[in-house]
Image (cartoon, rainbow, N blue to C red):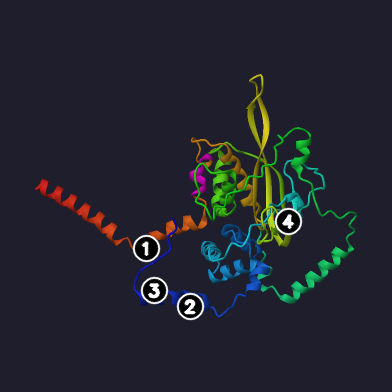
Amino acid sequence: MGYVPVKGGTQAIDASIKRVKFERLKGQAILEIETILSTMRALVDQVMSESSLYSPQLAALAIKQAEGSMEEAVFLMRAHRSTLPRLYYSESVETDAMFVERRISASFKDIPGGQLLGATYDYTHRLLDFNLINEKKADNTQWLQSYAEELQEVKVEETVERYPKVVEYLRKEGLFEQYEMDNTEPEDITKQNLEFPASRSARLQVLTRGQTGALTSLAYASLRGYGEVHPTVGEVRVGSLPIYVKHPNEEDGSEDEEFYIGDIQVTEVESFVPVHVKNENNEEELEFEIGYGICYGQNETKTIAMSILDQCLEHLNDEFPTHDEEFVLLHIDSVESSGFISHLKLPHYVTFQSKLDSIRQVKKGVQVNES
């Protein structure tokens, strides 16, 4: 349950709202939406993912309005999303058709198509760059021009636009189990209440829009021993996926025709999880299963954490909280969790006074008995 409404003195509330605006404007500086889009792509991606609304422009607006508060920006985006009409559902996407910008594997050094490092902070020194304090637009323009010239001098022997999935090569070797295509219509948790036990489609939807820190924390707990999943990352992909929809007025049974409406950037992870199984001779053998994660934008930590929790929830176990569906899925939602915590700031005068009266009555009774 999310707590939103506040009741109180109108004048006091109006004054509080004006004070919020004053705090944002008192520095006499204006942060342009384009500046946020150009310089805070990680924050924009995170807001879109947690709000389950792909719109960089609106995410940047929410960040500006919320003064950089993640939970408030996600709340604004979710609230706006709830006002939008659902005109149609997009068709299923085969992610092997991704136009890859970054693609690495921690399981193999040499993978078909090669490792593509792309843009990442993984290989930086993580030292503060004090030059950014006096950053100038002219210097940036000059650097971009130099970089463009450098790229033109690079000889590209082969252009690869589509990269094969690493796991498919392992399946061909018989190292991963083959599954038949499951065309079951996925549930839509934005239209239906989450019920337990949850289907995998519902679980993945909750995980992909879960709060990044919450997913990371629970996945880390599983790795430390408060769970039974410790995977190796088989493949991390960052790239663009095409989105198609059917005509909204198309009648059932008519010839299928899909319409391209645009691309979205996503991060996808397939983790390889070792599991022990019994063979026909009741002997224990080692096999691998796949933990899956995907989210809007570039957020590799969240997606890897999602793949861990996906695998945890495939093997329910009351012994570990990370393998408990209700514990995980009901506590990782940014709006739900922050809303419930924030509601403690609302007036609780009646209930607290009731508790005080009870304590006072008890203490009076004790004093009477002592006298």
**Tag 2: Cα neighbours inside 10 Å, few (<14), some, or many (≥20)?**
few
Kindly identify which residue carries mark 1. 346
Residue 21: within the magenta?
A: no
- Across and down, in percent, residue 205 comes to 58, 51
- Across and down, in percent, residue 189 comes to 54, 52
- Across and down, in percent, residue 158 comes to 89, 54
Earlier-in-chain disc, 4 versus 3:
3
Mark-to-mark CA distance, 3 and 1: 13 Å
Earlier-in-chain disc, 1 versus 2:
2
Local SS, label 2: helix
Kindly identify which residue carries mark 2. 22
Front position among marks 1 and 2: 1
Residue 325: within the magenta?
A: yes
Mark-to-mark CA distance, 1 and 2: 23 Å
**Residue in front for this viewpoint, 79 or 339:** 79
Q: Are marks 3 and 1 in contact (CB under 8 Å)?
A: no
**Tag 3: Cα neighbours inside 10 Å, few (<14), some, or many (≥20)?**
few
Earlier-in-chain disc, 3 versus 1:
3
Front position among marks 4 and 2: 4
Query: Secondary structure of the magenta portion, mostly?
Result: helix
Local SS, label 1: loop
Q: Which residues are magenta?
A: 323-330
Q: Quadrant of the N terminus?
A: bottom left
Mark-to-mark CA distance, 4 and 3: 45 Å
Which amino acid does the dot numbered 2 rest on? Phe
Earlier-in-chain disc, 3 versus 2:
3
- The mark found on residue 13 in the picture is 3
